[in-house]
Image: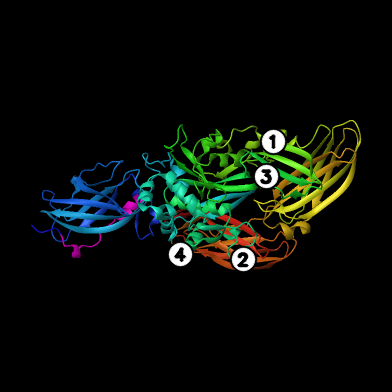
Amino acid sequence: MSPLTEESSMHQVNLEISENLERHRTTGFSRSETLVVRRGDPFKVSLPLKTRPYDPSTDTLWVKVLLGRLYVLMPVTLSTKFSLSRWGAFMDPDSLNPNNLTIFISAPASASVGQYRFKLWVFAKGKTTVCAVDTFILLCNPWCQADSVYIPFEDQREEYIHNDSCLLFMGTAKNIVSRPWSLDQFEPYVLEACLNLLSISPHHQHNRRKDYLNRRNPVYISRVVSAMINCEDDRGVLKGNWSGDFDDGVHPSKWTGSSDILRRWAESGYHPIKYGQCWVYAAVMCTVMRVLGIPCRVVTNFNSAHDTNGNLVIEEFYSETGQKLKSTKDSIWNFHVWVECWMTRKDLEGDMDGWQVLDPTPQKRSGGVFCCGPAPAKAIKERRVDLFYDIPFVYAEVNADVHTLVVSEGHVVSRSVDTDRVGPLICTKAVGLPRMQNITRDYKHIKSLTSTMSSNRSSVSESSTLRRGTKRLAAFLTLDKTPVAGTSILFTLKVVNRQSAAKMMKVHLNAQTKEYNHSPSETFWEAHKVIELAPLEVKVLKQQIHPFQYEDVVGDNLVNLAAVLEDMVTQERVLAFEEFNIANPQLVIEIEGGETVAMHKQQAASVTFTNPFCHPVSGLLSVSGSSLIKGHANSRMFPLRPGESGKHRINFFPSMKGTKMLQASLTLSNRTTITGFKMVTVRRV
């Protein structure tokens, strides 16, 4: 009897793409040239036999699966059973077609992530022939209970794996800005870029066999990805820049999605893309982790501490006239963005499964490289600083105390301590809804009701605020309303004399701009006055900063507003301050015919912007949306006078069903970025 087939005459195996993608919930990757499946679940291939039919009494089939030089060789059995702990291959004996063999290949729930090759070997009367050779990509499987990334709720799996858009929360805890971001995990070339990220990492280049073996563990994968998103130690994706000079790259605020960054990185031969800041690093990492099958979400920590010496204390210094000084390496970022990934932690004692903090922004070395995590949120909450990885660093980001000092002629003349200012609000996008979800309780034991508020109320508790004074004198500085671009900044300074004696007071008011992660720059507005306080008097001072006084300097920056009161007799000083952002208007997006549209049919939308500023503005409008628009639809917005509106019409062509995000970004000539988004439901025709 001759072999079933000659090697030269065999066609490529039928990968049954549609059926496998549907079974493995990988239909989003249908544009990939390679079959994409998930571990812990068999996938189906068909082998047409042209020479003669398969005879199970005399013929045998073997499958060889290879990842790099690692391989497993297994016989194809007549069975429908498969193991979650080892590789296997089988055929259903009840539906065996001798002329077209249907073979199922099953990967264990702990198999390594990567691009595999497989060969089908046919044994016929002692002779062997390689019948077919092909490839497939294997991802983690959060739908499989035996997988270490299993997450038990379907709505969460859809959100943290399949959702190709998200919201990034920025600004301040009192005035949260929702920035749309397109994760783009199903866009062309993104899957390949994510797999290549693993392959060009130093771990892989140093020891490929060890790297392939370790890729079964999401703890290992997440640390590799965290290091590879930044380029400080390797050929990573993004170069960070906080200098304010972005002329030789892209301003971080101009990025609207991950695919542009990952595509440019791949096309450049894996040279770092300029530039990123924390939210860009985190959003790109979220894309990579969702592509690899590990549930992931982007998280914002407001008033995030950067404790350089590890003493859980941040010191801030002010001058006697209320100017914030650059005199310490410690800092508080108004917001900082990282990611959480869901996984079990068999490497740790106790119940540390669930959400794990990972931070790709290069801040501190971990294991010799710039990466952070995975640090269990449960361990941070319980201050388990003895566990892996980087828990003390993350703990300080959400729990450090703030010591605020006023200095005069090199001497400290006032000191206050705030235990609630750091990490008052930690949040992420809600499951299935375009709004914020407060997850502060996942990280810390809440001390007061105030710190659980997710509204725009003050992030400082009353007990903390009262410490902004002494037994003799107190000051309270509050914004009268949320500052909005084009309107005056209205604020109130309340001064309290707690003694039964009159006082003469100097009042110094100072406003500075600052980036979210920097100390303030030079003063752009100040006021000084002398007031008299009667015994036990409470005096309220109303103040305002006009738009023409801040518009040219604030832009996308924040404002540090401070007041220093000085008793002219005793020289006692009290400081009060607020850091806030000025809300920009949103672009208004309207879908013609409603927010439910049909696949594969041209649709139209309009984008409207109304100029709130005191001067004419112009800029570049960019509209994008994963599986809605190929690339970006760009147009120039001509100068609009104050109060004038401009409307632009754009067309889009939905190519994938589901809830999708259509987003728009307007970059003004002063580099201020205005954004807007609209969720669109795409249905099959």
In what element is the residue under mark 2?
loop
Q: Nearer the viewer, residue 332 or 325?
A: 325
Taking the image as shown, residue 288 lies to the left or right of residue 478, namely left
| Location of residue 445 in the rendering, given as x and y in whole percent from the top left corner | 59, 32
In what element is the residue under mark 1?
loop
Disc 4 versus disc 2: distance between alpha carbons?
A: 22 Å
| Location of residue 488 in the rendering, given as x and y in whole percent from the top left corner | 77, 53
Label 3 belongs to which residue?
Answer: 174
Q: Can residue 221 be spotted in the picture?
A: yes
Q: Residue at coordinates 69% horizontally, 58% vertically from top-left?
A: 555
Disc 4 versus disc 3: distance between alpha carbons?
A: 43 Å
| Location of residue 424 in the rendering, given as x and y in whole percent from the top left corner | 64, 39
| Location of residue 326 in the rendering, given as x and y in whole percent from the top left corner | 71, 50
Taking the image as shown, residue 76 lies to the left or right of residue 124, namely right
Q: Residue at coordinates 35% horizontally, 43% vertically from top-left?
A: 110
Q: Closer to the camera: disc 4 or disc 3?
A: 4
Q: Closer to the camera: disc 3 or disc 1?
A: 1
Of pointers 2 and 1, the one earlier in the residue sequence: 2
Of pointers 4 and 2, the one earlier in the residue sequence: 2
Disc 2 versus disc 3: distance between alpha carbons?
A: 32 Å
Asked if labels 3 and 2 touch by Cβ distance under 8 angstroms, the answer is no
| 670 relative to 75, above or below | below
Label 1 belongs to which residue?
Answer: 461
Q: Quadrant of the C terminus?
A: bottom left
In what element is the residue under mark 4?
loop
Write the start and end of the magenta stretch as one range.
5-22
Amino acid, disc 4: Gly
Residue 18 is a magenta residue: yes
Label 2 belongs to which residue?
Answer: 247
Of pointers 1 and 4, the one earlier in the residue sequence: 4
Of pointers 4 and 3, the one earlier in the residue sequence: 3
